[in-house]
Image (tube, rainbow, N blue to C red):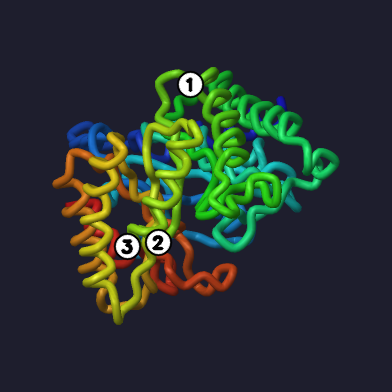
Amino acid sequence: MKNIIGKTLLLASALLFSITGTSCSNDDNATPEKEKTYDMSGFAKGADVSWLTEMEQNGKKFYDANGKATECMALLRDLGTNSVRLRVWVNPDGGWNAKDDVLTKAWRAKNLGMRLMIDFHYSDSWADPGKQNIPAAWNDFKDDLDKMKAAVAAHTTDVLKTLKDNGIDVEWIQIGNETRVGMLWPLGLVSNNNFANYAALNNAGYDAAKSVYPNAQCMIHIDRGNEIGGFTWMFDGLKAAGAKWDVIGMSLYPEDDNWQKATDDCLANVSTLASRYNCKVMVSEIGMPWDSENAAAMMKKMVDGCKAKPECLGIFYWEPECYGGWNGYSKGAFTSEGKPTDALNAFKN
């Protein structure tokens, strides 16, 4: 841990110097460059940048509109982003998105004054509507609800306590990722409208998160933010089963042939869900093909529409820094040359 924290401190110190340090000059009459200020409060304009350290390790660089190489989080901040979202895996291959890697990125975000969302997948790799695989280390009790709850609580506490012990605040915490039919399958799979196990596992994560960050807002996150039926089915069932949550999170990935209707429906669903369940809503993930001629208009509509709703806490672009075919993902918001696209202008404005 000392090595990763030391490395993190060095990265953060270098980053802060490059952003806020003033240049020396032999000209006594030179006008000092005015330091930029940033308003990080209010509506969350965020980006999930969980791939960032791995991309950097693989030589990826990021450039502003003028072609100047710039650290990615600082560039996103200059474009109007005020929050960062980071996913957490339990024991992933290579260590990417494990606790130490999350700490590195969270420390960098903190030193830029950015707010933080932590997204627990409770898996060694991707958890989404098609898979919610139990971490390998937890397989011995895949049929034991009490032991699985204890593992969820211990993992949640361990990661969050590490962040807190390093002076990092966490504002939002996802208990699971796109858990359309539950998490930690098959134990937490919602089948035959039986929500009890999933609710119990969710509550184990919720209680652990609150024990470390009492003021953080915990979230249950579902995909297809434009389809209300999946949300009401899930949250009606969870409510009846005694599940705990503070915020409903949603994903939305429109395409060129449906973006107008998808965004209309999603914005309407934000208000419907907030009223029905008496809670706030967050668009935790959004994205569109980077070269779509509709991406900028889609993002402006969604940012403006969400910001106009007091029941909506914010909106996070998912992995906007991806470019050049990184991991086959094409819905980032950077060009093939590593420059931001117009889609991110919605945050600046």
Residue 219 x, y percent position in the rendering: 44, 38
Crowding near pointer 1: few (<14 within 10 Å), some, many (20+)? many
* Residue placed most toward the observer, 349 or 313: 313
Q: Image check: 259 left or right of 125? A: left
Crowding near pointer 2: few (<14 within 10 Å), some, many (20+)? some
Q: Residue furthest left?
A: 308
* Mark 3: amino acid: Asn
Q: Which residue is drawn at 52% across and 70% down?
A: 329
Residue position for label 1: 213
* Mark 1: amino acid: Tyr
* Mark 2: amino acid: Arg
Question: On residue 224, which mark appears?
Answer: 2
Q: Which residue lies furthest to the right in this view?
A: 140
* Residue placed most toward the observer, 18 or 62: 62
CB contact under 8 Å: marks 2 and 3? yes
Q: What element carries label 1?
A: loop
Quarter location, residue 146: top right
Quarter location, residue 2: top right
Compute the Cα span from label 2 to label 3: 5 Å
The number of numbered discs placed on residues in the rendered structure image is 3
Q: Can residue 37 be seen in this view?
A: no
Q: Residue at x 64, y 43 (%)?
A: 122
In this rendering, is residue 132 above or below 203?
below
Compute the Cα span from label 1 to label 2: 29 Å
